[in-house]
Amino acid sequence: MERRHILGLILAGGLGRRMGGVDKPLMRLGGRTLLDRVVARLAPQCDAGLVLSANGDPDRFAGFPGPVLPDTVPGLPGPLAGLLAGLDFAAARDPDVTHVLSVPGDAPFLPADLAVRLGAALAAAPIALAASGGRAHYTVALWPVGLRQDLRRALVERDERRVGAFIARHGAAVVEWPIPQADPFLNVNTPEDLAAAEDLDLRPELAGRASEPPPGA
């Protein structure tokens, strides 16, 4: 799949309860915010640009290089609402944008081959889902824009809140990433996770790859 067909969606709507209620993407790791690190790794893989799913005052993300999208479904239903906002934006933006690549805003070590490998897996299923260590990462996935109407019905009519349940109804190809030294999908959910990320940030196999697209992309 060509990068011009992919819009990047960063999910930053979580309440951050385990981090004291702070905006996790704005926490700093090695002098840079987690969000800056996610942007640096995702932007080269999504030529259609990036959007940020976040509620509240968008000015707190003033440095983000794209629109900040609030939920369009009331009640803070979670990441599925952020996904819907991203799919709706993609549909309105450009007919050439066929897919949305979603990632969490607190995952600073995302792999540079994320879009390429997930895109290649779409031949087997409508959704491609990342996994590592035998665990699926439901918010790290490549979604067809055409799913947006069914997703809206799931949220509004069926009160669906679980990303995994929505994926299961449509089917997904699961793409496994190896973790020989570190998990590229590490989420910073707790102070302990942040300390672990600080240790990992010093490793050469994770550093310096933030803005490099995979060969042949």
Image: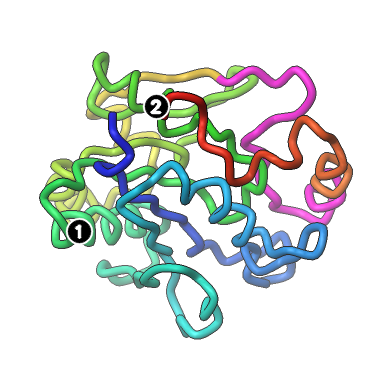
184 magenta-colored: yes
Horizontal arrangement in the rendering, residue 27 relative to residue 200 (left or right): left
Residue 26 horizontal/vertical position (percent): 65, 69
Q: Report the disc number at residue 140.
A: none
Circle 1 Cα neighbour tier, 10 Å, few/some/many (<14 / 14–19 / ≥20): some
**Are the residues at dot 1 and dot 2 in contact (C-beta closer than 8 Å)?**
no
Image x and y of residue 208, in percent:
72, 42
In the drawing, does residue 203 fall left or right of residue 118?
right
Q: Secondary structure at mark 1?
A: helix
- Callout 2 crowding tier (Cα within 10 Å): few <14, some 14–19, many ≥20: many
Rendered residue at 54%/76% (across/down): 63
Looking at the image, residue 55 lies above or below residue 166? below
Q: What secondary structure is the magenta-colored segment mainly?
A: loop
List the residue tagged with mark 1: 88
Mark pair 1, 2: CA separation: 21 Å
Nearer the observer, 75 or 29: 29
Query: Residue at position x 48%, y 28% from top?
Result: 130
The residue type indicated by label 2 comes to Leu
Q: Is residue 141 above or below residue 210?
A: above
Q: Dividing the image into 4 quarters, which one contains the C terminus?
A: top left
Residue type beneath disc 1: Asp
The residue identified by callout 2 is: 118
Name the residue rendered at 51%, 62% in the picture. 12
Residue at image location 49% in from the left, 85% down from the top: 59
Q: Which residues are magenta?
A: 177-196
